[in-house]
Image (cartoon, rainbow, N blue to C red):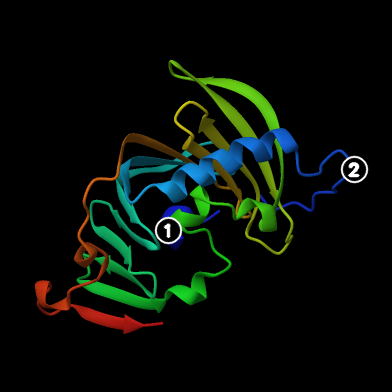
Amino acid sequence: MKHVLMLVAAVITLTASAQKDPKAKAILDKVSANFKSLKTVQGNYSLDVTNRAGKNAGKKSGKIFLKGQKYLITETSLQIMSDGKKIWRYDSDANEVTVSSAADAGDGITPQKLFTNFYDKDFIYKLNGNVKQGTKTVAEIEMTPTDKRKNFFKVYLYVDEAQKMIVSSKIYENSGNIYTYSMSGLKTNAPLDDNMFVFNKAKYPGVEEIEQ
């Protein structure tokens, strides 16, 4: 999940006004409760990367599938999947899969964390108000990590309050890159087989397996 959800480094001085905003918390709590009530979530996502100079540094798109602690992310030549215990990153161009423990991603942002109440522990947040995205009006929530050693310093979440879902996010990384993620075509509670969240080596003859 590192590639999809890696969150222009600066030491931010937190003042008394930069506490956890109860209005932002109320919105995030509803998103979290809604997500926890769903058996599965799937949809399309797009990623736009802007570099320190403000120029486009790449675009990607794919699909995401969530089921409890399990997830699958697919792009053109990349699949990232987890059964909640292991994470597999399969690169079809190299016919190579990297295997790591899901427990090692504890400090990272996983798909589940984006939709659940990770914000209470890891961030100070505030509601900036409503903004327009296309034809929709969404709530903008500004989030600052409490741990200044993180490789990002700011996250903006955009929430459709009627659907109680995060529809996009913007992540400011230490490198100077800005990652903008957008979600569309969300479907909930559709049946998803557990096997789709586990890498099946037999389906990829000659695949090189790398343990991390």
Instruction: Give the farthest residue toward the top.
Output: 135
Q: Which quadrant of the structure image shows residue 122? A: bottom right
Marks 1 and 2: which is nearer the front? 2
Give the residue pinned by disc 2.
16
Q: Quadrant of residue 196?
A: bottom left
Front position in the image: 150 or 18: 18
How many angstroms separate mark 1 from mark 2 (CA)? 34 Å
Residue 7 seen: yes
Q: Mark number for residue 19?
A: none
Residue carrying label 1: 3
Q: Residue at x 66, y 24 (%)?
A: 129
Report the residue at 62% width, 59% height from top. Answer: 151
Counting from the top left corner in percent of width and height, residue 74 is at 27, 54
Q: Secondary structure at mark 1?
A: helix
The residue most toward the front is: 37
Q: Nearer the viewer, residue 179 or 109?
A: 109
Q: Residue furthest bottom?
A: 211
* 131 left or right, relative to 103: right
Question: Closest to the observer: 31 or 102?
Answer: 31
